[in-house]
Image: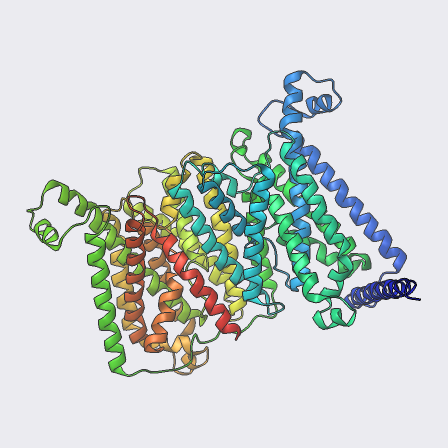
């Protein structure tokens, strides 16, 4: 009896598992049928026929794009030569081009698209969030940082070892984002957590690239994502890893379907929820690491590919099952990657297209997808006042202001006196009187403009963030998060790369034009419905992603061998600034402060709600437009004078309201002082901690601002 009992138990367990699988399939099919209209409910036979037809069409599309991709390149090897090379009738030069370059490129595109499409589909299912992907979960940013750390150590790793390093970094980043955002708590929270963490991780990686340029050479171009290959070695080494990850996900497909029904329903079906979710996230991170190792981060494929398949589940019942939907999502991902590469090489001349990463095109597609998703989002939350109404005493305000003034004076003196060479106050006094030596004069003439640029840029960004948060009544609004700073950076980079001799005022004007265009796009699209939080933030993040992709495109096309210089400017560095560079932002800051102080009552009313200002006779749309124009001017001139500096416009207004309440007559001066002190301190640390090497102030503020931003998300969830 003892010998037979395990067989009986095993049979019972097998029958239970089969019954669980059958129930899961029935529930999934029922949900798919319910999602369709009564008239359009397909029969089982029609559904299977439709699934087969759609799958076959996608396979043919991928094959057609692959054939088109093989025929494109810099060498004069057209379709006829490709056909001869594939049949063994071409000469040696044509055959080497096709076999060693174009076929590996096409194969890498298919492999990367498949693994990213499948990874995005399973991440969206287990998190029950349509915006989950390797990009929004910061998987790519974590892998990028891990490989940057490995490169900075000078250790040369084989391909599979690099994949393991990327896998560890991406998995850790995804775990942090999922823990901070929670499951099923809304689309925006996950995107915000992932975007903030990715910004912080990328800032750390860019710091490594600047500190160790020789060890990390080529990592910046690699980070843009390119499927170009030298032979099949990389594809063949990573193919078994990708196959193992895909097979693991297909084996857990039934459990994934159960998780899509909700945790309680999955537990009722006997599915171990936590173990299944951990397994799926690990396998998705493994697939993402495979793609990152082979081709670099190809942005937003894991976000867009499942979105293309999702409508099919409402039309055909079979696509509601993961074992059918995952392969189709992989085919859609392959089509996106190959289609982007084909489109790029069709629009850009062949000699230039070689230098343009495929990831730039997919990032632009993903940016458009985010904006469209934001406009179609229905479960948006209304805009809210940033904090609870609290009015500290006048003594608290005066004491806070006095302390901040002392802090600003202290960091200003520290910025002037400290650096790779230390000075004394007597040296500064002699310099102001024209009696300093040549060495001291040289140091101060280069250091003082940097300090003033940091002070003015920080104050301008803090004031811009205060105005934007008041107008939108959105505590998460920030010129950087909303894409305004990205638009300013795009305008400035466009002018600098096309007109290298452009002057200070020209760069400031180009930055303002870019910021104005980005702000019109963001605020114009988000204005419908009253600047609702979800729509505004998603549109802003989409525009920011698009501007980042265009900046990368400009850098690669115009000066591919000078990425360090571009990174230095984009990291928020004040290096090489002169007093004329500070004049535009200083003038705009003075004008912005005058407007904010003179219109402080209107700011208070606008930040309350939409009805009170109208009842008091205030033209709300006109007031909003005026404040937004001022904030755009402030952001643009700050970017033109000190580069891209993140999170100052978010942290400073929040901290100011926590210290002195919500009345803008107190918030504005405190926020301006906080912003100036924060950026000046970041610039000072970047110049002194690792002197003579330097880090940009933007990298330091991102390192500080990322934890604070994530803290705000956790606090708002509670």
Residue at 92 percent of width and 63 percent of height: 4
Q: Is residue 615 above or below residue 314?
A: below
Q: Quadrant of the N terminus?
A: bottom right
Q: Is residue 29 above or below residue 666?
A: above
Where is residue 129 shown, x and y percent of the image? Answer: 63, 63
Q: Is residue 109 left or right of residue 208?
A: right
Residue at 74 percent of width and 20 percent of height: 88
* Residue 627 in sight from this viewpoint: no
State the residue lying farthest toward the top: 91
Where is residue 210 shown, x and y percent of the image? Answer: 39, 43
Q: Is residue 26 above or below residue 659?
A: above
Where is residue 334 shown, x and y percent of the image? Answer: 68, 44
State which quadrant residue 560 falls in.
Answer: top left
Near-viewer residue (699 or 602): 699
Residue at 46 percent of width and 70 percent of height: 474
Near-viewer residue (163 or 645): 163
Residue at 49 percent of width and 58 percent of height: 197
């Amino acid at each position: 009896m003892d010998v037979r009992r395990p067989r009986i138990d095993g049979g019972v367990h097998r029958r239970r598992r089969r019954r669980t699988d059958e129930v899961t399939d029935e529930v999934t099919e029922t949900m798919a049928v319910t999602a369709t209209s009564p008239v359009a409910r397909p029969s089982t036979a029609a559904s299977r026929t439709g699934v087969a037809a759609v799958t076959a069409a996608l396979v043919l599309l991928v094959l057609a794009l692959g054939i088109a991709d093989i025929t494109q390149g810099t060498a004069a090897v057209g379709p006829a030569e490709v056909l001869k090379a594939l049949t063994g009738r071409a000469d040696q030069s044509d055959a080497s081009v096709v076999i060693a370059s174009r076929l590996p490129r096409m194969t890498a595109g298919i492999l990367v698209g498949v693994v990213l499409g499948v990874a995005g589909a399973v991440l969206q299912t287990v998190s029950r969030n349509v915006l989950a992907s390797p990009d929004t979960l910061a998987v790519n940013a974590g892998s990028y940082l891990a490989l940057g750390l490995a490169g900075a150590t000078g250790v040369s790793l084989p391909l599979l070892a690099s994949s393991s390093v990327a896998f560890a970094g991406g998995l850790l980043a995804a775990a942090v984002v999922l823990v901070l955002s929670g499951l099923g708590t809304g689309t925006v929270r996950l995107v915000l957590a992932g975007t903030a963490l990715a910004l912080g991780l990328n800032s750390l990686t860019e710091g490594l690239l600047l500190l160790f340029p020789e060890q990390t050479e080529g990592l910046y171009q690699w980070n843009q994502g390119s499927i170009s290959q030298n032979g099949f070695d990389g594809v063949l080494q990573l193919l078994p890893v990708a196959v193992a990850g895909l097979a693991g996900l297909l084996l857990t497909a039934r459990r994934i379907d159960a998780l899509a029904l909700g945790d309680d329903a999955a537990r009722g079906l006997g599915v171990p929820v936590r173990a299944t979710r951990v397994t799926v996230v690990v396998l998705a991170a493994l697939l993402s690491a495979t793609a990152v190792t082979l081709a670099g981060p190809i942005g937003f494929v894991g976000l867009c590919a499942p979105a293309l398949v999702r409508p099919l589940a409402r039309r055909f019942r079979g696509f509601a099952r993961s074992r059918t939907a995952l392969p189709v999502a992989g085919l859609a991902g392959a089509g996106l990657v190959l289609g982007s590469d084909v489109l790029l090489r069709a629009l850009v001349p062949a000699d230039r297209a070689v230098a343009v990463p495929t990831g730039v095109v997919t990032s632009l597609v993903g940016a458009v997808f985010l904006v469209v998703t934001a406009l179609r989002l229905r479960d948006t939350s209304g805009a809210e006042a940033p904090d609870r109404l609290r009015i500290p005493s006048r003594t608290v305000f005066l004491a806070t202001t006095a302390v901040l003034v002392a802090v600003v004076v202290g960091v200003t003196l520290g910025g002037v006196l400290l650096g790779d060479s230390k000075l004394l106050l007597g040296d500064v006094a002699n310099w102001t009187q024209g009696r300093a030596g040549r060495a001291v004069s040289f140091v101060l003439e280069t250091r003082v403009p940097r300090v003033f640029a940091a002070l003015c840029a920080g104050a301008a960004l803090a004031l811009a963030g205060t105005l934007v948060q008041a107008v939108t009544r959105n505590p998460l609004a920030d010129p950087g998060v909303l894409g305004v700073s990205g638009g300013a950076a795009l305008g400035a980079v466009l002018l600098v790369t096309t007109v290298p001799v452009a002057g200070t005022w020209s760069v400031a004007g180009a930055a303002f034009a870019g910021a104005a265009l980005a702000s019109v796009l963001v605020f114009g699209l988000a204005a419908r419905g009253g600047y609702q939080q979800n729509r505004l933030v998603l549109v802003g993040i989409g525009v920011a992603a698009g501007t980042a992709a265009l900046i990368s495109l400009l850098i690669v096309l115009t000066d591919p061998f000078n990425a360090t210089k571009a990174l230095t400017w984009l990291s928020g560095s004040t290096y090489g600034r002169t007093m004329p560079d500070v004049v535009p932002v200083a003038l705009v800051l003075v004008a912005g402060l005058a407007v904010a102080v003179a219109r402080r009552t209107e700011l208070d009313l606008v930040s309350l709600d939409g009805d009170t200002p109208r009842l008091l006779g205030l033209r709300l749309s006109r007031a909003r437009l005026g404040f937004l124009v001022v904030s755009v001017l402030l952001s643009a001139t700050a970017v033109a004078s000190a580069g891209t500096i993140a999170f100052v416009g978010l942290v400073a207004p929040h901290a100011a309201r926590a210290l002195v309440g919500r009345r803008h007559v107190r918030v504005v001066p405190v926020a301006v002082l906080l912003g100036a002190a924060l950026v000046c301190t970041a610039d000072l640390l970047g110049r002194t901690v690792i002197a003579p090497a330097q880090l940009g102030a933007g990298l330091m503020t991102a390192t500080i601002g990322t934890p604070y931003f994530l803290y705000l998300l956790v606090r708002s969830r509670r």
